[in-house]
């Protein structure tokens, strides 16, 4: 079940961050701030949290800031469900597109996003710690809930 993240979930999210993102991980203050920041939406699966997604909507643009799943809970559809939840909510909030950055060597995430209708629109050189490039992906939200629009 997907639900809103709560202050009681912060420690579990921080633990996943440290495990999954290493030097780029959000710490306690950052995760707690995401719960209350304007335009942010933190959604989680599990109790304790096994997966979460963080989105930001400003005007007509939604950004996927984070999505992560505990290693032992992967390939069960959790990220796909969180991503679709984020897409539906962003469209309802008035966004007409969702953007995200992903490392060029992150095969799992690249396949997740491609399967959800995201396409490459740009690249950012040496965006991540260690000098890995980022791919900027975009998905239209115009065609209604869950639809994969093609307005490029
Ligand atoms: C990327 C990530 C969020 C996927 O989470 P998940 O819950 O395992 O993903 P799902 O089970 O919903 O998978 C959806 C689809 O994504 C693709 N996918 C997911 N993991 C994959 C992998 N390891 N290899 C290839 N494709 C993969 C598949 O197409 C999959 O569909 P399928 O299982 O029917 O083949 C997870 O691997 C993770 O937390 N990675 C570390 C954090 C991260 O990289 N976040 C994204 C940063 S931009």
Image (cartoon, rainbow, N blue to C red):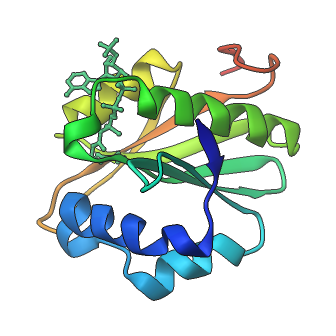
Residue 120 in which image quadrant: top left
The residue depicted at 19 percent of the width and 62 percent of the height is 19
Question: In the drawing, does residue 28 fall left or right of residue 22?
Answer: right
In the picture shown, does residue 20 fall above or below 148? below
Question: In the drawing, does residue 127 fall left or right of residue 147?
Answer: left
In the picture shown, does residue 24 fall above or below 107? below
The location of residue 145, given as percent across then percent down, is 78, 21
The residue depicted at 70 percent of the width and 76 percent of the height is 37
Residue at the outermost front position: 47
Residue at the outermost bottom position: 29
The location of residue 32, given as percent across then percent down, is 55, 80
In the picture shown, does residue 51 fall above or below 113? below
Residue 96 visible? The answer is no
Residue 19 visible? The answer is yes
Q: Camera-side residue: 123 or 100?
A: 100
The location of residue 98, given as percent across then percent down, is 64, 40
Q: Camera-side residue: 147 or 78?
A: 78
The residue depicted at 55 percent of the width and 34 percent of the height is 83
Q: Camera-side residue: 119 or 24?
A: 24
Q: Quadrant of ligand 1?
A: top left
């Amino acid at each position: 079940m997907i639900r809103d993240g709560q202050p009681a979930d912060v420690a579990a999210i921080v633990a996943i961050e440290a495990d999954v993102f290493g030097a780029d991980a959000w710490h306690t203050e950052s995760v707690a701030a995401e719960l209350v920041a304007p335009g942010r939406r933190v959604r989680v699966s599990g109790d304790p949290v096994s997966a979460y997604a963080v989105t930001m909507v400003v005007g007509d643009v939604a950004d996927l800031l984070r999505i992560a799943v505990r290693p032992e809970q992967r390939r069960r559809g959790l990220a796909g469900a969180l991503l679709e939840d984020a897409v539906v909510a962003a469209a309802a909030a008035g966004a007409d597109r969702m953007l995200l950055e992903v490392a060029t060597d992150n095969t799992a995430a690249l396949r997740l996003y491609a399967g959800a209708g995201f396409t490459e629109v740009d690249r950012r050189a040496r965006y991540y710690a260690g000098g890995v490039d980022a791919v900027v992906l975009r998905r239209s939200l115009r065609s209604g809930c869950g639809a994969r629009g093609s307005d490029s």
